[in-house]
């Protein structure tokens, strides 16, 4: 089959899930093209990488406000449609694979399904209505527009795949999907160098190193981790813990300002977006990973990539106890069941000070990932979804 994958919020190969799906489909014998934005250092408009054709389009930028989202999605939809037409002229496609958020990509897929008979697969990474409510904290006219967009995408899709059982249950109910048209394709890292050499210089002379990897937006809770560091340093009087917060996003500058305002420059390193090589060295070095996504209706449905990446490197975790976070990590994490920076900081210190417990938790997480949540199982479901479509 000729497959066209659309992803709006991250470029490939930076988006690990989408790139792994693209490579798996290629390995299954399909011809794969990906359309994604020009961002995060991936600005080449066209390239062929590992046998996969990539088209990248300009967008207005990563949004942090309602007006910013409107501008981002308007420019993204235009760029995606232009690239999709280019892909259609150059050879066409049999399946168009829509990766949310947002749930607006059905606008690009609709004419190809209506006039070209193309099948549509809806890849639900996030429940967009819940994400919208978490970002803006209210339900208004725009929220209901988002719900309508989700329903339109579900109605257009021939097959739906979801990252976990919670998301699948929600979309099956909302879209009234039959069991044979809904599949779970979990995200699990499979191309990371887990044998990379540790880099002890990242500790900045401290005994312990706590790591974070991920997007820094207003729904990701990184401010909790910054304030947890403040609690550790100023309230608990600990000067032996270094934090390494890797990643970028619309809140990165504000988080840097918060760190500096709290006087934590010597305790928190924030290098921004890092290379895969740096990331793997850092994950080999840290003593534990932090997942600070707050407990709410949106995050309860999310499987966080960082959680699985910590597990891949056999690192124990401290995290807020979201529903899917607890399912993913199992016994591989310590859970804080309240959105509290102080309690997050206390849990981090408690685990750092108990090395035998850290080792036991790390081993449990790594075993769960490799035996129960591994990517090979997800590939089987992905291929089955395409056969159903």
Image (cartoon, grey):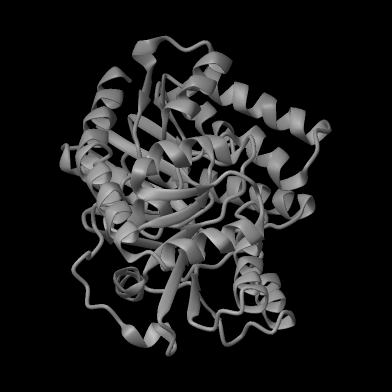
* Of 2 and 327, the residue lying toward us: 327
- Tell me the quarter of the image containing the N terminus: top left
**Relative vertical location of residue 241 with respect to residue 25 in this rendering, above or below:** below
* Of 177 and 311, the residue lying toward us: 311
Quarter holding residue 68 = bottom right
**Relative vertical location of residue 161 with respect to residue 365 in this rendering, above or below:** above
Write the residue at 46% across / 52% down: 36
Write the residue at 35% across / 43% down: 331
Q: How many marks?
A: 0
Question: Residue 186 location, x and y as percent?
Answer: 35, 37
Q: In this view, does 141 lie to the left or right of 255?
A: right
User: From this viewpoint, is residue 89 visible?
Assistant: no
Question: Residue 220 location, x and y as percent?
Answer: 60, 54
Question: Residue 306 location, x and y as percent?
Answer: 42, 55
**Relative vertical location of residue 68 with respect to residue 233 in this rendering, above or below:** above
User: From this viewpoint, is residue 120 visible?
Assistant: yes
Write the residue at 48% across / 82% down: 240
Quarter holding residue 195 = bottom left
- Tell me the quarter of the image containing the C terminus: top left
Question: Residue 305 location, x and y as percent?
Answer: 41, 51
**Relative vertical location of residue 31 with respect to residue 306 in this rendering, above or below:** above
């Amino acid at each position: 089959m000729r497959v066209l994958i659309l992803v709006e919020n991250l470029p490939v190969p930076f988006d690990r899930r989408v790139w792994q799906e693209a490579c798996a489909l290629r390995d299954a014998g399909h011809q794969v093209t990906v359309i994604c934005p020009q961002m995060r250092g991936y600005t080449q408009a066209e390239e062929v990488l590992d046998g996969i054709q990539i088209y990248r389009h300009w967008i207005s930028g990563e949004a942090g406000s309602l007006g910013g989202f409107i501008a981002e999605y308007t420019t993204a939809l235009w760029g995606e449609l232009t690239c999709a037409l280019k892909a259609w002229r150059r050879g066409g496609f049999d399946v168009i694979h829509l990766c949310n958020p947002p749930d607006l990509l059905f606008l690009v897929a609709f004419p190809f399904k209506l006039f070209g008979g193309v099948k549509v697969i809806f890849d639900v990474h996030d429940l967009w209505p819940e994400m919208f409510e978490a970002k803006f904290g209210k339900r208004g006219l725009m929220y209901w527009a988002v719900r309508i967009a989700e329903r339109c995408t579900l109605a257009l899709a021939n097959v739906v795949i979801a990252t976990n059982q919670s998301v699948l249950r929600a979309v099956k109910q909302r879209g009234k999907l039959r069991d044979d048209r809904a599949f779970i394709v979990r995200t699990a890292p499979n191309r990371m160098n887990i044998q990379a050499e540790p880099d002890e210089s990242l500790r900045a002379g401290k005994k312990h190193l706590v790591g974070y990897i991920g997007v820094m937006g207003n729904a990701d809770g990184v401010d909790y981790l910054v304030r947890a560091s403040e609690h550790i340093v100023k309230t608990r009087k600990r000067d032996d813990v270094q934090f390494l917060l890797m990643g970028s996003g619309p809140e990165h500058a504000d988080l840097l300002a918060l760190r500096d305002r709290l006087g934590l420059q010597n305790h928190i390193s924030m290098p921004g977006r890092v290379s895969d090589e740096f990331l793997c060295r850092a994950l080999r070095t840290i003593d534990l990973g932090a997942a600070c996504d707050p407990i709410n209706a949106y995050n309860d449905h999310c499987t966080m990539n960082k959680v699985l990446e910590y597990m891949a490197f056999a690192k124990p975790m401290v995290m807020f106890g979201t529903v899917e976070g607890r399912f993913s990590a199992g016994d591989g994490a310590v859970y804080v069941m309240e959105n509290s920076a102080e309690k997050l900081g206390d849990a981090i210190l408690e685990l750092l000070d108990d090395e035998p417990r850290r080792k036991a938790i790390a081993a449990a997480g790594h075993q769960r990932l490799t035996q129960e949540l591994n990517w090979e199982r997800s590939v089987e479901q992905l291929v089955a979804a395409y056969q159903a479509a």
